[in-house]
Amino acid sequence: MSKQKVVMFDFDGVIADSFNIFFTEFTRACEELGFHKLNSKEVLLSLFDGNLILSLFKLGFPPWKLRELFQKFQPRIAEANSRVKPFDGIKETLEDISRTYPTYIISSNLSEAVRNFLTRESINGIQDILGADVETSKVKKIKQISKKHPNHKPYYIGDTCGDIKEGREANAITVAVTWGWHSKERLLKSNPDYIVDTPEELRELLLS
């Protein structure tokens, strides 16, 4: 089998240290639409045990209000991302990996917000960004990118149990990072193929 890889990164919690800002802005947008069940950080974190949008629906969010939620959330998260910083060492890791393998971002965030963040932080080498505005299923997005690179082994890097589950369902090799939204103990329950504690470990794993 080819040793070539195609590498797909989650954004929030892997690249961007954004949990507190995401929690504030996302819950505020939901509350303005009359949805008040995101009343603690743990409730929000539990949404990421699976697919964010499906978990939100299961919690009782009306599916017909999803477009309105995105309309409220998009300008706020775009502004909020101007206050978000990348995790230490992740920029260098991303750029080293992207010089060797095709590298993408697959996220529940919005593509434009991610793109603006990368531009502001001068993070280069990302081939494309597939946010929630492109498709809400990470499984479909991972498969879409894998089809573009049929001779490459797909890797998906995430920081939540939902990331790992969707990566596995899409037949990607899953890598859980422990500096993000879900704890190491929680991530281990999702049985990732690999688990790493620092961006440097991630770089060594992918470039070895």
Image (tube, rainbow, N blue to C red):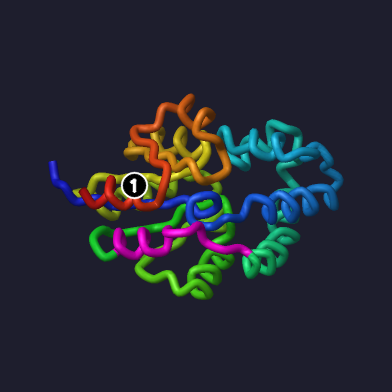
Determine the image quadrant of residue 29: bottom right
Which of 144 and 116 lies nearest the eye of the viewer?
Answer: 116
Residue matched to label 1: 201
User: Does dot 1 land on a helix, a strand or a loop?
Assistant: helix
At a point 53% along the width and 64% down the height, the residue shown is: 114
Q: Is residue 79 left or right of residue 120?
A: right
**Image vertical order of residue 207 relative to residue 72, above or below:** above
In the rendered image, the quadrant that contains the N terminus is top left
Image location (x, y in percent) of residue 47: 64, 36
Give the magenta part as a residue range. Answer: 84-98
Q: Is residue 68 left or right of residue 152?
A: right
Which of 10 and 141 lies nearest the eye of the viewer?
Answer: 10
Q: Is residue 20 left or right of residue 157?
A: right
> Total of numbered circles in the picture?
1
Image location (x, y in percent) of residue 26: 72, 51
> Dot 1 surroundings within 10 Å: few (below 14), some, or many (20 or more)?
some
Which of 133 and 98 lies nearest the eye of the viewer?
Answer: 98
At a point 65% along the width and 67% down the height, the residue shown is: 83
Which of 130 and 204 lies nearest the eye of the viewer?
Answer: 204
Q: Is residue 3 left or right of residue 116?
A: left
Identify which amino acid the numbered label 1 is placed on. Glu
At a point 58% along the width and 59% down the height, the residue shown is: 110
Most distant residue in the top direction: 189
At a point 46% along the width and 53% down the height, the residue shown is: 106
Does the magenta stretch mainly form a helix, a strand or a loop? helix
Magenta stretch encompasses residue 85: yes
Image location (x, y in percent) of residue 40: 77, 38
